């Protein structure tokens, strides 16, 4: 594992309001939003031509804090301030989730590139989502927030980057749900995007992945405190259990054996692995929202680049944007054959593989390998 050094960028969380009652944002599902607030962070400086941008896309429970040390507290005045305050309290003084890759002289070199990372539509870290206030009711949307897709998320990101003055994106990069966004960027906006880097994801969510998502959603919905999505406090047991189920799919048998084996906690009757899963579940309860979890797992399940298009292989073949598909050797959630499939069928693509025992989460751990693979790809553009 790469040793994270002291951060060399100083992020500031910013907010922007996009669309309005007079200019509605139309969703794929047919509903609309009359105002969309997006939280985002930027690193580096946009050049005069607006052509040196890189967009970083986060995963399911991720956020815009991709790099740097979070030192200034900020919150969404039109959302769940309590949840955001919990988030900033938890992450204040800590490095961003891809800090090892973003900064001066790092893989995404902020002396050269203008790096953007936004909290996605539907999330709960400052962007419009279930915890936000519904302007029609003046109450939080909660479970009534409309269904969204990866393409909706990408359209909002496009509106953001155009507002920031970006005319060309050198690459869009992300893992898991972030990789799904990257793929759609390459398909939807080839005139704007030179390349995409998709890590540990697929062209369409498999039945295997959908099944795992459904088990997580049922864990939340079967918590009596969920109250059909109109809860006043987080359904902690359900959300914690959902995260525990997810964590098993994010790691691998080898990583669990390496870390825990069959060891107990202090000679008790409780296995260390059980304690680890409970810890991860409870930690998410402190920083996330159950309805948001339901919404975004559904977004992932609906991911299919062939929807309302041609066959999957034809969509990939017609994709003009250069693709780097990165697989993870021990990933059981998105096995390597899914990334190889994309690379084999896309007209301008390369496959690379992270060798790791850590499973799907290796894209948040194996920074040395990622740096080498991505660095070589960026140099080839």
Image (tube, helix red, strand yellow):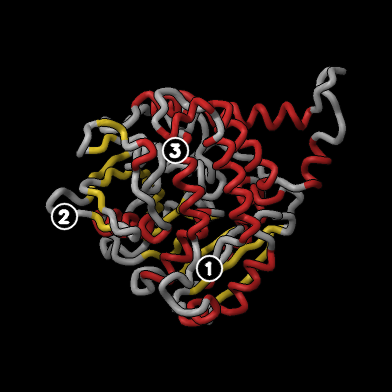
Residue 8's place in the image compared with 22, above or below, is above
Q: How many marks?
A: 3
Quadrant of res 193: bottom left
Question: Left or right of 103: which side holds 201?
Answer: right
- Identify the residue at horizontal 26%, vertical 59% (top origin): 162
Is residue 262 in sight in this rendering? yes
- Please name the residue that numbered disc 3 is placed on: 291
- Identify the residue at horizontal 52%, vertical 56% (top origin): 301
Residue 56 in the image, given as x and y percentages of width and height: 45, 53
- Please name the residue that numbered disc 1 is placed on: 379
* Residue toward you, 53 or 158: 158
Whichever of callouts 2 and 3 sits on the residue coming sooner in the sequence is 2
- Please name the residue that numbered disc 2 is placed on: 23
* Residue toward you, 41 or 212: 212
Q: CA distance from mark 3 to mark 1?
A: 41 Å
Question: Left or right of 255: which side holds 85?
Answer: left
Q: Nearer the viewer, mark 3 or mark 1?
A: 3
Which secondary structure lies at badge 2? loop
């Amino acid at each position: 594992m790469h040793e994270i050094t002291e951060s060399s960028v100083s992020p500031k969380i910013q907010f922007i309001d996009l669309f309005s009652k007079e200019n509605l944002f139309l969703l794929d599902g047919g509903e609309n939003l009359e105002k969309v607030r997006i939280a985002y962070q930027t690193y580096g400086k946009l050049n005069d031509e607006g052509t040196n941008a890189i967009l970083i896309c986060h995963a399911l429970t991720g956020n815009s804090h991709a790099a740097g040390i979070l030192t200034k507290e900020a919150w969404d005045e039109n959302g769940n301030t309590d949840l955001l305050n919990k988030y900033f309290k938890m992450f204040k003084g800590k490095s961003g989730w891809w800090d090892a890759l973003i900064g001066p002289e790092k893989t995404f070199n902020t002396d050269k590139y203008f790096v953007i990372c936004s909290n996605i539509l539907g999330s709960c870290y400052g962007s419009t989502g279930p915890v936000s206030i519904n302007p029609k009711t003046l109450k939080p949307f909660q479970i009534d927030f409309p269904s969204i897709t990866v393409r909706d998320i990408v359209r909002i990101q496009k509106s953001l980057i155009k507002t920031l003055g970006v005319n060309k994106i050198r690459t869009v990069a992300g893992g898991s749900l972030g990789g799904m966004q990257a793929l759609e960027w390459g398909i939807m906006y080839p005139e704007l995007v030179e390349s995409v880097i998709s890590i540990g994801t697929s062209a369409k969510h498999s039945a295997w992945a959908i099944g795992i998502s459904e088990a997580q959603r049922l864990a939340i919905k079967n918590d009596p405190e969920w109250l059909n999505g109109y809860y006043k406090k987080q359904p902690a047991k359900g959300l914690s259990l959902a995260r525990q189920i997810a964590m098993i799919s994010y790691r691998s048998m080898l990583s669990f054996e390496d870390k825990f084996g069959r060891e107990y906690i202090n000679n008790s009757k409780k296995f260390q692995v059980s304690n680890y899963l409970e810890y991860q579940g409870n930690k998410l309860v402190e920083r996330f929202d159950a309805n948001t979890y339901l919404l975004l797992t559904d977004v992932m399940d609906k991911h299919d680049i062939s929807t309302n298009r041609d066959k999957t292989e034809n969509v990939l073949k017609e994709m003009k944007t250069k693709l780097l598909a990165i697989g993870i050797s021990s990933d059981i959630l998105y096995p390597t054959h899914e990334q190889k499939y994309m690379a084999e069928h896309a007209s301008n693509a390369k496959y690379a593989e992270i060798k790791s025992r850590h499973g799907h989460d290796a894209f948040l751990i194996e920074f040395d390998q990622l740096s080498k693979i991505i660095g070589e790809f960026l140099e080839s553009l």
